[in-house]
Amino acid sequence: MPILDSAGQKTWQLRNRNEQLVRWAGWLVGVAIFMWCWQRISEATTWAFVWDAPRIAADMASRSWPPRWSYMETLWAPLWDTLNIATIGTMLALVMAVPVAFLAARNTTPSAVFVRPIALLIIVSTRSINSLIWALLLVSIIGPGVLAGLIAIALRSIGFCAKLLYEAIEEIDTTQVEAITATGASRWQVMAYGIMPQIMPAFAGVAVFRWDINLRESTVLGLVGAGGIGLQLQSSLNVLAWPQVALILIVILVAVVVSEWVSAKVRGAII
């Protein structure tokens, strides 16, 4: 028997027997899947190392402190490389993402049957591959260094930026576009004066947000040879120089906090 509120709307109703059975069967299947997954993980885990992890972590922390502050002189150049990888990579991604976004948006694509699926495929494919995997592939193709990291960041960011931009394009006010079209403007003029002014705030927000993400990701690309401060981190880990590792982690943390602050300020000014 349903319970109605003062407006006559149903607020609660007791489930019947079949609904209860289906609900409990779903819970039973979920618990069974969880227990099976936990068993597989447990079989592949060396629990002796897990129980010994607190002691090992405490030993590493004691070896890492105090950080080797004198090593900071060596980190300025890799930190600058990391900033360049994130910044230039984001700029390249935006240059490539804008046309892809226009091709993917329903209201601007030249062909919803042929062109739009290709643009969506580019968006999905670039977003589905992590920047570390891109960096591994590019290091194998063009060799280690900053260039591989820069291209990896750019490729990873195309799908992210294009997806948000084409969604913004599809949500524009069509009356402004129709007014400019009625004046006899060409397709490019409609895009320049009717669409671009409406998506510029979204474009600026996406650019800053993605730059913030890319700065975080570029700090670890050096672990696979793609340049930046991650390369110094990998070198210090290889020789077990824990005080240097501690300093590098502190520098990365400070860089991420500063980028977050800058990103928040810029987004606040835009919005």
Image (cartoon, rainbow, N blue to C red):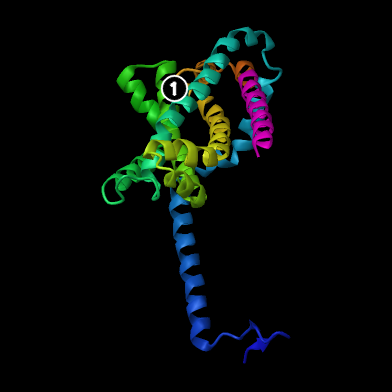
In this rendering, is residue 1 above or below 238? Answer: below
Left or right, residue 268 beside residue 193: right
Who is closer to the viewer here, 206 or 237? 206
Residue in the image at 68% along x and 12% along y: 69
Where's the C terminus, which quadrant? top right
Residue in the image at 68% along x and 17% along y: 67
In this rendering, is residue 9 above or below 155? Answer: below
Left or right, residue 135 beside residue 113: right
User: Mark 1 sits on what residue?
Assistant: 150
Q: Position of residue 80 (x, y in %)?
A: 56, 14
Residue 260 part of the magenta-drawn span: yes
Q: Position of residue 89 (x, y in %)?
A: 47, 25
Residue 219 part of the magenta-drawn span: no
Left or right, residue 118 beside residue 91: left
Q: Secondary structure at mark 1?
A: helix
Q: Amino acid at mark 1?
A: Leu
Who is closer to the viewer here, 267 or 4? 267
The residue segment tinted magenta is 247-271
Residue at the outermost bottom position: 1
Left or right, residue 137 beside residue 75: left
How many marks can you see?
1
Residue in the image at 30% along x and 43% along y: 118
Q: Quadrant of residue 256?
A: top right
Residue at the outermost right position: 6
